[in-house]
Amino acid sequence: MSDISSTSKPVIVTPGDPAGIGAEITLKAALASPIAFVAIADPAHMADAAKKFGINIPIHVWQKGTVIEPGCLTILEHNWPAEIIPGKPIKENSLAIIDAIKSAVSEIRSGNASALVTNPINKFILYQAGFKFPGHTEFLATLSSVRTQPVMMLANKFLRVIPTTIHNPVSEIPSILTYDLLYKTIVIARQDLITDFGIPNPRIAVCGLNPHAGEQGALGSEEIDMISPVISQLLSEDIHIDGPLPADTLFHQEARDNYDLVIGMYHDQVLPVVKTLDFNNTVNITLGLDFIRTSPDHGTAYNIAGKNIAKCDSLLAAISYAENLSQTRGKYTQINSRSIR
């Protein structure tokens, strides 16, 4: 890493799919964010978007190593090869979307940026350009020098959750959900809660897979055969963990006061809860990487692209998380005088 001061190491924001709401929310966030960030963007496209949306904001090209001025949009130039039509993604821009993500990670590795925030992509369009990953999370794991299992966390001020399996059909979950997968997910999550969130001894609650956590095998055996053995092993390693617990009684306020993180078994067991508690400010965070990555927890929103009604709340929250997590990781690294992993 280079010797650029922390004040001149901004968060770097990728454009996502240019046919979505990325440009709009990035412009709005640049006006509202107290945290310096650089947007990877096409200058002409952003200028046109700002004019269309009535956003009066100076647009500057990033001078690496300098402090970013507030109230302006600072960009790392990135050109789109094809026309951008709001709400209508085209495959001709797919490689440029992927290249923007790679470029952002490269700037972090070079010491020019502190953390990554990714605007939403449409993986189905990217598949047409040879993209072979289920989503951002898995792709970013290949750009990390640390070859660990990537873990997806959703977080807001009320709750942090992790689904052990992510974008899988419900019918496949029992076969995908293994001892090793659950064990590694929890270990990686605990490590990042310590290094990035500054929680010295994280309290982790683990859901069962079946209703009422299986009711001693009456409603399913996964809790007995797999989940409980993982928890027993982690307890023997002095990890503060509890479960398997019934998901239907785990998320009310009194219960939430007793843990720092919930590990769910599948996507819709935990994500609807965290989004219901604070939809606009929920952030997607990738754990297990050697760089910080956050993202707004919404999609490309093609249906409202170009209409000047998209809210930048989740992007602002993602930028704030990225800045805070990178600072906490930096302090942890300095205090321990060793590599994070």
Image (cartoon, helix red, strand yellow):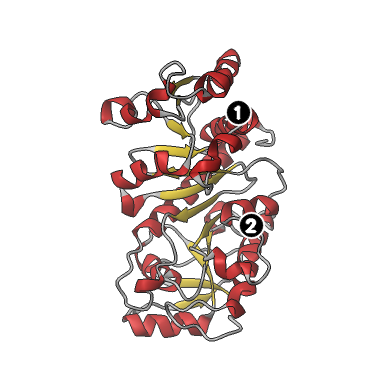
At x 62%, y 27%, the residue is 179
Which amino acid type is shown beneath numbered disc 2?
A: Phe
In the picture of the structure, the residue carrying the numbered disc 1 is: 183
Numbered circle sitting on residue 106: none
Q: Position of residue 84 (x, y in %)?
A: 50, 83
Image quadrant assignment for residue 225: top right
Question: 27 or 228, which is in the foreground?
Answer: 228
Which amino acid type is shown beneath numbered disc 1?
A: Tyr
At x 31%, y 75%, the residue is 308
Disc 2 residue crowd, few under 14, some 14–19, many 20+, Cα 10 Å: some
Q: CA distance from mark 2 to mark 1?
A: 23 Å
In the picture of the structure, the residue carrying the numbered disc 2 is: 133
Mark earlier in primary sequence (2, 1) = 2
SS at badge 2: loop
Q: Position of residue 232 (x, y in %)?
A: 56, 15
* Quadrant in which the C terminus appears: top right
User: How many numbered discs sit on the rendered protein?
Assistant: 2
Q: Is residue 180 among what the camera can see?
A: yes
Left or right placement of residue 181 versus residue 157 in this view: right
SS at badge 1: helix
* Up/down of 215 relative to 55, above or below: above
* Up/down of 4 relative to 18, above or below: above
* Up/down of 117 relative to 92, above or below: above
